[in-house]
Amino acid sequence: MTTITWTTHSEEDTKQFAEKLGGLLQGGDVLTLEGDLGAGKTTFTKGLAKGLGVKRTVNSPTFTIIKEYMGRIPFYHMDVYRLEDSDEDLGFEEFFNGEGVTVVEWSQFIEDYLPEERLELTIEYVDDTSRKISITARSNHFEQVCKEMST
Ligand code: ADP
Ligand code: MG
């Protein structure tokens, strides 16, 4: 199990990092995003979507929980913040096992539904303009992705 850590120094920096990662993903990939409010989860997701070829603007899906986009493959953006303290299943598996890439903001709130094979990301506030991003590979495919991210 590999964990890699980067520090980004601007919003743009985080987006570029995410865009590079987006370019390495394939259908069925699931990424979990943890980090406090304002850490940069949605910012990261916007960059990732760009790397997946999504042209539409990606906004936080807080009120819809799941939003779908189309890029070179489908992209499913979930923000499950509102599901804290509920164990409601909104049919997550259909997305996780689907053709697209899924990103889950606040994934700790649906821990029980997450697939074992996933890329776990944590974003931590360092200061006004800097964030520490850690990614942990939970499958062989993601080990490979981590390797490519560090070259
Ligand atoms: P979250 O979805 O985790 O609540 P957002 O992505 O909505 O967070 O907000 C992150 C905020 O932090 C934005 O206002 C963004 O401009 C700011 N920010 C400052 N520095 C960075 C950085 N290095 N990476 C990402 N966001 C940053
Ligand atoms: Mg957000």
Image (cartoon, rainbow, N blue to C red):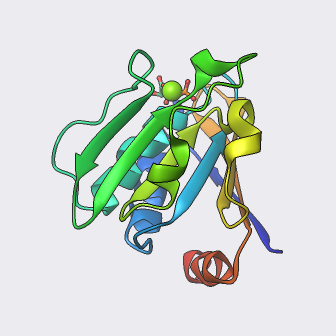
Quick one: quadrant of the C terminus? Answer: bottom right
- Residue 21 vertical position relative to residue 134 in the rendered view, above or below: below
Residue 30 at x, y percent in the picture: 55, 58
Q: Quadrant of residue 134?
A: bottom right
Q: Position of residue 5 (x, y in %)?
A: 73, 60
Q: Residue at x 22, y 36 (%)?
A: 57
Q: Nearer the viewer, residue 145 or 130?
A: 145
Image: 136 above or below 123: below
Left or right, 56 with reference to 133: left
Left or right, 34 with reference to 69: right
Going by the picture, which residue comes out furthest to the left?
Answer: 55
State which quarter of the image contains the N terminus. bottom right
Instruction: Work out whether residue 60 or residue 17 is closer to the camera in this orientation and state it.
Output: 60
Residue drawn at x 68%, y 67% is 117
Residue 62 coordinates in the image, percent (x, y): 45, 19
The answer to whether residue 101 is left or right of residue 151 is left
Residue 11 visible in the picture: no
| Residue 126 coordinates in the image, percent (x, y) | 73, 34
Instruction: Please tell me which residue lies in front, 51 or 131.
Output: 51
Q: Residue furthest right?
A: 1
Where is 75 relative to 112, above or below? below
